[in-house]
Amino acid sequence: MTDTIFVSGLALHAYHGVMQHEAKVGQTFKIDLTLTIDLAEASRSDQLKHTVSYDAVVNIASEAFCTRRYRLVEAAAGAVAGAVLDAFSQVLAVTVTVHKPHAPIAATFDDVGVTVGRSRRGGR
């Protein structure tokens, strides 16, 4: 199956990180989501009930990412992936990329982060 729904560049301020100042000040993370879903019925019917709402996906992802402090972005990404699968039974798999553009690294870099993939067939 090649049908996907995606949200790219969702900006969320959160307090994730190992360093003490990250817990106090926080930072803005960017999240990309790709949901694998069968969109055949939605493409025929033109009805929202045959797909998932982008707004609902953003709300679920934001809640999972922001309501708890994680030391590792790996854990935060996994929480988002799990929340999406739990909330939307028609989603077969989800890929979550968390970009941490202000990671406390003593180097110049364009981007740093993690990508996790979860599916209903395992991998959780």
Image (cartoon, grey):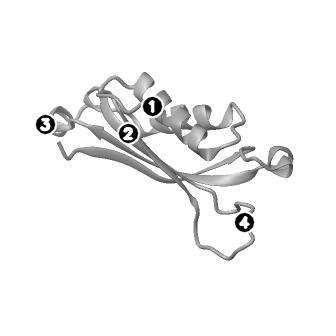
Q: Which mark is residue 25?
A: none
111 left or right of 36 in image: right
Please tell me which residue lies in front, 103 or 88: 103
- Residue at the farthest bottom position: 108
Q: Distance between the residues labelled 1 and 2?
A: 7 Å
Q: What element carries label 4?
A: loop
Residue 79 point in image, percent of width and height: 55, 33
Q: How far apart are marks 4 and 3 (CA)?
A: 49 Å
The tag earlier along the polypeptide, 1 or 2, is 1
Relative to residue 20, is residue 109 depicted above or below? below
First of labels 4, 3 by sequence position = 3
Residue for badge 1:
84
Q: Which amino acid does label 2 sit on?
A: Val
The residue wearing badge 3 is 44
Instruction: Name the residue tied to disc 4.
Output: 105
Mark 3 closeness class: few <14, some 14–19, many ≥20 residues within 10 Å: few
Pointer 1 and pointer 2: residues touching (CB < 8 Å)? yes
